Image: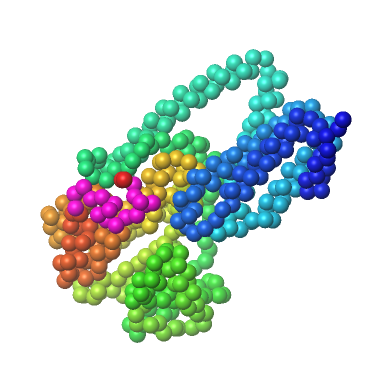
């Protein structure tokens, strides 16, 4: 007697074989796991649950892979195979329609992208191995020997990367007893992947220099002059936030949206009078070079004018692989060399820093090394020799001590504030800056760092 008919998405399937039952179970597995991975929320929710979402997507990939192997490595009736393919394709289409968002609340586009980026190469590799297995004698032995060689090589490389990781930038990290240090084992397995592996689908990462040109300057009356090869020029004026109440700054996402909501965009049609309270201008690399030239050409080096501040915000590091960041290497190197050759480093305090470490991608989702990087963002400072001399021995010792201690952006804030008021600075600001050593053995509780962002629990 035949089993009853199961109808899924309008496609009839006869539950008359073990293969059909297995297909039904595997389909339930990948669909339910994928649906669970679509849970959304704010940035904190994503950070706390990214690892779980990664496991759920991995379960979906393995279940889909098992279905694929069953379809092409088992003897099935043509109609049964066709119906299974139709059901799988229909479910994938439904998943995309159900959620193809690109935000924290709905992020189905990225989930499906990750699923396919794992599923396609994995199944191509399995298919190749299957073909080699049935065509080459003793292929299993050859494969096992190759695996052993790969594992030995990977172990040597992993030890090398662990050694580099443990030394820190410029080999400056020291394991000092009692000071903040990361917890758990660090195995940077993702670093073993060949360069470009995680972004193979995105093509090359070598960008041509932009042909666009922009020139901008302020005069003493606060009038902005801009000349640009683009026909459309906009000036975005961000709101003053220093006097906002604390509740308006309670959460980063809320604060970010409020800033953008109150931003004023103006079309530039000619010289524009700017508010006297505007304190900084933000450009890209090519544009900030031109702005530096304009500012320095009109600056009296012997005057007592208040120092100016330039900030460049780069987003190339805001992706999950860490590979896009290297596209900045040559441009950043040229920028620093130009600063040195022009003599600007003789009177410039240069900060290179990140607001957070890696917070997406395979490394962050699955490995403790990704969590370490997330909670330990990059920070470097270059100070001219005369300033280091004026700061004195105590400040020099403070900077050296703070390299090995737990610091926060609050100390960076007071460092910038001290430099902005130099040489008549507030001693209280100086004591809270990076020039003064923070408390030895400082903990996250001492620094008011939440548990989710603490690397030394």
Q: How is the image coloured?
A: rainbow
Q: What residue sits 84% from the left and 31% below the top?
A: 77
> Percent from the top left, x then y, of residue 163?
34, 34
Q: Quadrant of residue 198?
A: top right
Residue lying at the far front in this picture: please name it: 1
Residue 344 visible in image: yes
Instruction: Specify whether 358 is left or right of 67.
Output: left
> Percent from the top left, x then y, of residue 13?
81, 39
Residue lying at the far left in this picture: please name it: 393
Q: What residue sits 87% from the left and 30% below the top?
A: 1
Looking at the rendering, the stretch of residues picked out in magenta corresponds to: 439-455
Residue 389 visible in image: no
Q: Is residue 310 above or below residue 243?
A: above
Q: Is residue 103 above or below residue 245?
A: above
Q: What residue sits 42% from the left and 32% below the top?
A: 158
Residue lying at the far right in this picture: please name it: 1
Task: Judge whether residue 447 is colored magenta.
Answer: yes
Instruction: Specify whether 441 is left or right of 89.
Output: left
The one nearer the camera, 190 or 53, is 53
> Percent from the top left, x then y, of residue 143?
59, 20
> Percent from the top left, x then y, of residue 149?
50, 22
Q: Quadrant of residue 437?
A: bottom left
Task: Judge whether residue 197 is colored magenta.
Answer: no
């Amino acid at each position: 007697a035949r089993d009853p008919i199961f109808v899924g998405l309008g496609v009839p399937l006869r539950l008359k074989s073990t293969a059909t039952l297995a297909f039904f179970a595997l389909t339930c597995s990948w669909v339910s796991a994928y649906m669970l991975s679509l849970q959304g929320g704010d940035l904190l929710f994503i950070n706390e649950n990214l690892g779980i979402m990664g496991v759920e997507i991995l379960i979906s990939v393995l279940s889909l892979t098992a279905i694929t192997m069953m379809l092409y490595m088992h003897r099935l009736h043509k109609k049964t195979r066709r119906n299974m393919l139709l059901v799988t394709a229909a479910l994938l289409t439904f998943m995309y329609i159900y959620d193809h968002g690109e935000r924290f609340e709905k992020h189905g586009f990225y989930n499906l992208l990750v699923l396919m980026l794992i599923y396609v190469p994995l199944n191509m590799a399995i298919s190749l191995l299957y073909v080699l297995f049935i065509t080459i004698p003793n292929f299993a032995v050859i494969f096992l020997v190759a695996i052993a060689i790969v594992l030995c090589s990977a172990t040597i490389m992993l030890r090398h990367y662990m050694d580099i990781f443990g030394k820190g930038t410029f080999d400056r990290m020291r394991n000092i007893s009692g000071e903040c240090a990361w917890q758990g084992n660090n195995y940077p397995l993702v670093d073993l992947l060949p360069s470009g592996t995680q972004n193979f689908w995105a093509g090359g990462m070598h960008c041509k220099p932009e042909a666009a040109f922009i020139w901008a300057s302020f005069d003493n009356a606060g009038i902005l002059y801009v000349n640009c090869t683009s026909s459309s020029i906009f000036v975005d004026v961000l709101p003053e936030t220093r006097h906002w109440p604390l509740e308006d700054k309670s959460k980063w996402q809320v604060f970010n949206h409020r800033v953008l909501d109150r931003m004023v965009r103006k079309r530039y049609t000619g010289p524009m009078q700017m508010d006297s309270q505007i304190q900084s201008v933000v450009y890209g690399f090519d544009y900030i070079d031109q702005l530096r030239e304009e500012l320095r050409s009109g600056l009296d080096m012997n005057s007592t004018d208040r120092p100016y501040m330039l900030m460049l915000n780069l987003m190339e590091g805001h992706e999950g692989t860490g590979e896009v960041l290297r596209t900045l290497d040559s441009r950043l190197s040229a920028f620093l060399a130009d600063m040195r050759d022009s003599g600007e480093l003789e009177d410039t305090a240069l900060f290179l820093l990140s607001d957070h470490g890696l917070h997406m991608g395979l490394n962050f989702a699955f490995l403790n090394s990704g969590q370490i990087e997330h909670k330990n963002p990059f920070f470097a400072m270059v100070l001219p020799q005369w300033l280091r001399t004026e700061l004195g021995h105590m400040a020099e010792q403070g900077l050296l001590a703070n390299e090995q201690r737990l610091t926060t952006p609050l100390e960076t804030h007071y460092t910038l504030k001290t430099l902005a008021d130099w040489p008549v600075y507030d001693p209280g600001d100086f004591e809270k800056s990076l020039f003064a050593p923070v408390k030895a053995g400082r903990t996250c509780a001492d620094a008011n760092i939440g548990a989710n962002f603490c690397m030394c629990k």
